[in-house]
Image (cartoon, rainbow, N blue to C red):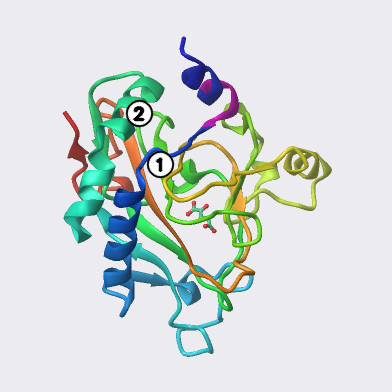
Amino acid sequence: MSSDLDTFNTDGYLVVRNLFDDQMVEDLQNAISRSLNPPLAPVEFEADVHYPGAPPSRQAPGGQTPRRLLHAFSRDLLFQQSARAEAVVGRLRQLIGTDKLCLSQNHHNCVMTKHPGFSSQTSWHQDIRYWSFDRPELVSTWLALGDETVENGGLLVIPGSHRLHLDRGHLDAALFLRTDIKANRDLIDKSVAVNMSAGDMLFFHSRTFHAAGQNLTDTVKTSLVFTYRAQNNEPIPETRSANYPDIPLD
Ligand SMILES: O=C(O)CCC(=O)C(=O)O
């Protein structure tokens, strides 16, 4: 077993440094700028997420702040190239354990943006909580297009949490980790910050607990995020996971 696979299986995530070179990063940043100024639909706004710190409505101050540029894969050929790049898909084959992969058009598939002033906080959760597949074994990729730190709302992860099976009582109504439970607070104490630079990529398991804070800097943070699955790990028909066809990668 390679050390990348060992790390991923143990921690539920893996960071690969400099996965994309400076030119690709710059091209992607330019593509995001074209999609962001003005924000091209479909867009999810901070006001839509109703997370702590989000503006209460789209009419409130900051209510038009974009949070996610949705449908990234169909938005720009460059995003498709980055999602299909051999450096990404080769690693995914290894981490997911098959050559037959699909990219999900229904989950993540977005440019995440975190703006100064009006960003919100994402509480501790597993992405799989709202997803419906044969098996909870998907992997998402998070490409940093600038520095990602705790200060600008970069991700925090709990190593090994993809292997946890928590009773329902540990989670709140929206399936976030409850912080009024000591066992959960002990778990959160084990979290680590995923500090990244432009071109670095985080691979993380759909069961890995993660969270992120607000962007407290004066610079917008942007990241490109896609989710992949084995072709034989199919979405449950008529769920949101089956809304649009997934893209086969072979
Ligand atoms: O950037 C963030 O606030 C985290 C987003 C996140 O965890 C998610 O979309 O699953």
* x and y percentages locating residue 113 in the rendered image: 45, 65
Residue at the spot 30% in from the left edge and 64% down from the top edge: 30
Whether label 1 lies within 8 Å of ligand 1 gets the answer: no
Whole-percent x and y of residue 122? 59, 59
**Label 1 crowd bin: few (<14), some (14–19), many (20+), radius 10 Å:** many
Does residue 207 appear left or right of residue 185 in this picture?
left
From the image, which quarter does the C terminus lie in? Answer: top left
Residue wearing tag 2: 92
The residue at the far right in this view is 182
Dots 1 and 2: beta carbons under 8 Å? yes
Left or right: residue 243 versus residue 60 is: left
Residue at image coords 36%, 27%: 91
Q: Is residue 91 above or below residue 197?
A: above
Q: Which mark is residue 141?
A: 1
Of residues 216 and 186, the one nearer the viewer is: 216
Residue 151 or residue 170, whichever sits in front: 151
| First in sequence: mark 1 vs mark 2 | 2
Mark identifier at residue 3 = none
